[in-house]
């Protein structure tokens, strides 16, 4: 994808809840929740990243 990024694995529930997420796992990109409550397949993650990083 040629995306320069940092990935953080957050386990602190207070930090997770601060995004309004009550169901994990969740994926947050650039401060925006793009998925929650579902384990994503690789192609789903790639598509979300492409969509958000346009």
Image (tube, rainbow, N blue to C red):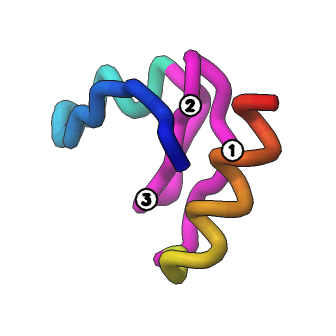
Please tell me the numbered disc located at residue 15. none
Circles 3 and 2, Cβ within 8 Å, touching? The answer is no
Q: Where is residue 37 in the image (x, y as percent from the top left)?
A: 56, 66
Would you name the residue on which mark 2 appears? 29
- Relative to the observer, which residue lies in front, 34 or 49? 49
Q: Does the magenta stretch include residue 25?
A: yes
Tell me which corner region of the image, top left, top right, bottom left or bottom right, holds residue 51: top right
> In the rendered structure, which disc, 1 or 3, sits on the residue that comes first in sequence?
3
Which residue is the site of mark 3? Answer: 24
Which residue sits furthest front?
Answer: 2
Residue 38 highlighted magenta (yes or no)? yes
Q: Position of residue 53 (x, y in %)?
A: 71, 30
Q: Is mark 3 on a helix, strand or loop?
A: loop
Mark 1 vs 3: CB contact within 8 A: no
Task: Point out the frontmost of discs 1 and 3.
Answer: 1
Quadrant into which the C terminus falls: top right
Disc number at residue 34? 1
Front tag of 3 and 2: 2
Cα separation between marks 1 and 2: 7 Å
Which residues are drawn in magenta?
19-39
Q: Which of marks 1 and 2 is nearer the N terminus?
A: 2
Question: In the displayed structure, would residue 37 be above or below residue 10?
Answer: below
Q: From the viewer's perspective, is 51 left or right of 24?
A: right
Q: How far apart are marks 1 and 3 (CA)?
A: 12 Å
Q: Residues within 10 Å of mark 1 (few under 14, many from 20)?
A: some
Q: In this view, does 28 lie above or below 37?
A: above
């Amino acid at each position: 994808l040629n995306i320069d990024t940092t990935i953080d694995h957050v386990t602190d529930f207070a930090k997770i809840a601060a995004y309004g997420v009550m169901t994990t796992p969740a994926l947050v990109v650039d401060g925006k929740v793009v998925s929650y409550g579902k384990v994503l397949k690789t192609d789903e993650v790639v598509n979300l990243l492409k969509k958000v990083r346009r």
